Image (cartoon, grey):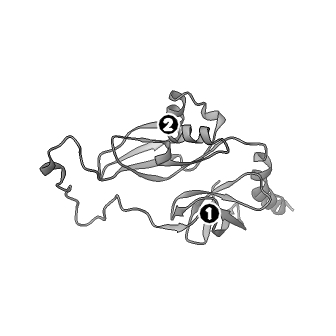
């Protein structure tokens, strides 16, 4: 009986508890490639909201300086909350989910202040490593029917859901289910499977 109750809670508690939650959803990505001098929230997260002007405002919130091409910068949920506060937005008014750590990767762009002969020279990359700025291959597309899996406490549960956004393996994406008032999030495992975030 206890395991049946736990299974029902895992599948529906998020929906019921969040049914009245109409806050904009900010789903942070595990990794993000950025170019230029700085990056904003839309570069490291997917923002969904029924209020289009609020969504546009959230997407354009500056997050900081972008790392140089080929270098990475660690960014976390606390950094995101701080930048939102600096922009006059209370993070408590948002539903923020996703990994607690984000790896921001600087991608290659021409340097506008350098002479053309210097800016045109590509940076030397070690032969043993693949280029870190390679775009990830999308395996799940918005609208795809996928299987949501939960495996914990000796209990394995699966449910049919629909992807609310595109995602590559390792990405955190939003998911929806018929009759549910709120979306769930999960980590893409392959083209048919998403693992439920705890």
Q: Observer-nearest residue: 32 or 78?
A: 32
Local packing at callout 2 (Cα closer than 10 Å; few below 14, some 14-19, many 20+) is many
Which residue of the protein is positioned furthest toward the bottom in this rendering? 192
Which residue of the protein is positioned furthest toward the left in this rendering? 117
190 vs 104, left or right, is right
Residue at left offset 55%, top offset 70%: 190
Q: Is residue 79 above or below residue 1?
A: above
Badge 1 element: strand
Which quadrant: the N terminus?
Answer: bottom right
Residue 175 found in image quarter: bottom right
Please state which of the two labelled residues, at mark 2 or mark 1, is closer to the viewer: 2
129 vs 155, left or right, is left
Please provide percent x and percent y for residue 187. 58, 60
128 vs 88, left or right, is left
* Residue that label 2 marks: 61
Residue at left offset 19%, top offset 58%: 124
Which residue of the protein is positioned furthest toward the right in this rendering? 1
What separation in Å lies between label 2 and label 1 (alpha carbons)?
A: 29 Å
Please provide percent x and percent y for residue 130. 31, 65
Q: Observer-nearest residue: 107 or 130?
A: 107
N-terminal label among 2 and 1: 2
Q: Is residue 150 visible?
A: no
What label does residue 195 carry, if any? Answer: 1
Q: Observer-nearest residue: 42 or 147?
A: 42
Q: Is residue 25 visible?
A: yes
Residue at left offset 69%, top offset 54%: 183
Tags 2 and 1 touching, CB below 8 Å: no
Residue 38 found in image quarter: top left
């Amino acid at each position: 009986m206890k395991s049946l109750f736990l299974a029902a809670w895992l599948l529906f508690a998020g929906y019921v508890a969040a049914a009245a939650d109409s806050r904009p959803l900010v789903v942070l990505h595990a990794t993000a490639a950025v170019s230029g001098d700085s990056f904003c929230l839309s570069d490291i997260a997917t923002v969904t909201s029924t209020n289009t002007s609020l969504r546009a405002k959230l997407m354009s919130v500056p997050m900081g300086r972008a790392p140089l091409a080929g270098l990475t910068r660690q960014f976390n949920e606390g950094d995101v909350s701080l930048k939102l506060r600096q922009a006059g937005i209370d993070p408590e008014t948002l539903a923020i989910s996703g990994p607690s750590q984000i790896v921001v990767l600087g991608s290659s762009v021409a340097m506008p202040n350098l002479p053309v002969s210097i800016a045109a020279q590509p940076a030397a990359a070690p032969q043993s490593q693949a280029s870190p700025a390679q775009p990830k291959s999308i395996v799940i597309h918005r609208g795809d029917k996928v299987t949501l899996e939960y495996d914990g406490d000796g209990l394995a549960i699966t449910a049919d859901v629909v992807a609310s956004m595109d995602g590559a393996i390792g990405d955190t994406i939003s998911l929806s289910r018929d009759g549910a008032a709120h979306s769930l999030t999960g980590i893409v495992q392959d083209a048919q499977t998403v693992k439920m975030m705890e």
